[in-house]
């Protein structure tokens, strides 16, 4: 979708339709973790949350993998994607995904040597030449994951 005109962001949502007294909702939902400087006051409305989501300042997760911080360092062709991730189950892999606007490619980083209930600070150098956007994800051995929204490169 990000190869189409303008930035596109993926919003997590959960359709619960019908609930029973013994249903567990949390394990079934994917959520958005929005980056904010502070928790907005109720009286101030939803503007800070909506502004952050419109800017892509959030990540999506099933909850078992969290991304504490993420971003891009550097300028020009030589840049580095940084991310702090933590997980519950043994991690399987991380991936950096990018596109030049036509072709989507990715670099997969095996995490099978990492322990459960751990964390890792990623620093992934990449060549930004010709790339329009880049995003990062971590996936565990149970199929749970977390991913950033695409960062559009200038």
Image (cartoon, rainbow, N blue to C red):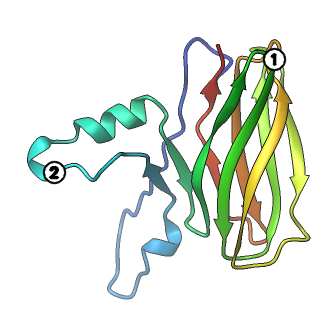
User: Considering depth in this image, is 25 or 103 the residue closer to the camera?
Assistant: 103
Q: Which residue is mark 1?
A: 77
Q: Position of residue 113 (x, y in %)?
A: 91, 71
Q: Position of residue 30 (x, y in %)?
A: 51, 59
Q: Secondary structure at mark 1?
A: loop
Q: Secondary structure at mark 2?
A: loop
Callout count: 2
Does 131 sit left or right of 148 as displayed?
Answer: right
Does 39 sit left or right of 1 as displayed?
Answer: left
* Label located before the other in sequence (2 or 1): 2
Does 113 sit left or right of 130 as displayed?
Answer: right
The residue sitting at 8% across, 47% down in the picture is: 43
Outermost front residue? 74
Q: Quadrant of the C terminus?
A: top right
User: Considering depth in this image, is 142 or 148 the residue closer to the camera?
Assistant: 148
Marks 2, 1: nearer the viewer: 1
Q: Which residue is mark 2?
A: 41
Q: Is residue 103 above or below residue 20?
A: above
Instruction: Choose top left, top right, bottom left or bottom right for residue 124.
Output: top right
Q: Quadrant of the N terminus?
A: top right
The residue sitting at 27% across, 53% down in the picture is: 39
Crowding near the residue tagged with mark 1, few <14, some 14–19, many ≥20 C-alpha atoms within 10 Å: few
Q: Position of residue 149 (x, y in %)?
A: 58, 37
Crowding near the residue tagged with mark 2, few <14, some 14–19, many ≥20 C-alpha atoms within 10 Å: few
The residue sitting at 65% across, 66% down in the picture is: 86
- Cα distance in 3D space between marks 2 and 1: 41 Å
Q: Position of residue 123 (x, y in %)?
A: 78, 46
């Amino acid at each position: 979708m990000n190869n189409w005109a303008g930035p596109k962001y993926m919003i997590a949502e959960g359709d619960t339709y019908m609930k029973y007294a013994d249903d567990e909702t949390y394990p079934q939902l994917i959520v958005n973790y929005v980056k904010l400087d502070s928790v907005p006051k109720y009286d101030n409305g939803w503007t800070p949350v909506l502004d952050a989501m419109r800017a892509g300042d959030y990540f999506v997760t099933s909850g078992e993998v969290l991304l504490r911080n993420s971003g891009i360092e550097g300028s020009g062709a030589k840049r580095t994607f940084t991310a702090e991730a933590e997980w519950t189950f043994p991690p399987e892999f991380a991936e950096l995904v990018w596109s030049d606007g036509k072709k989507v490619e990715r670099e997969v980083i095996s995490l099978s040597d990492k322990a459960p209930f751990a964390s890792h600070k990623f620093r992934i150098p990449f060549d930004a030449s010709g790339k329009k956007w880049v995003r990062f994800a971590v996936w565990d051995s149970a199929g749970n994951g977390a991913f950033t929204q695409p960062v559009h490169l200038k």
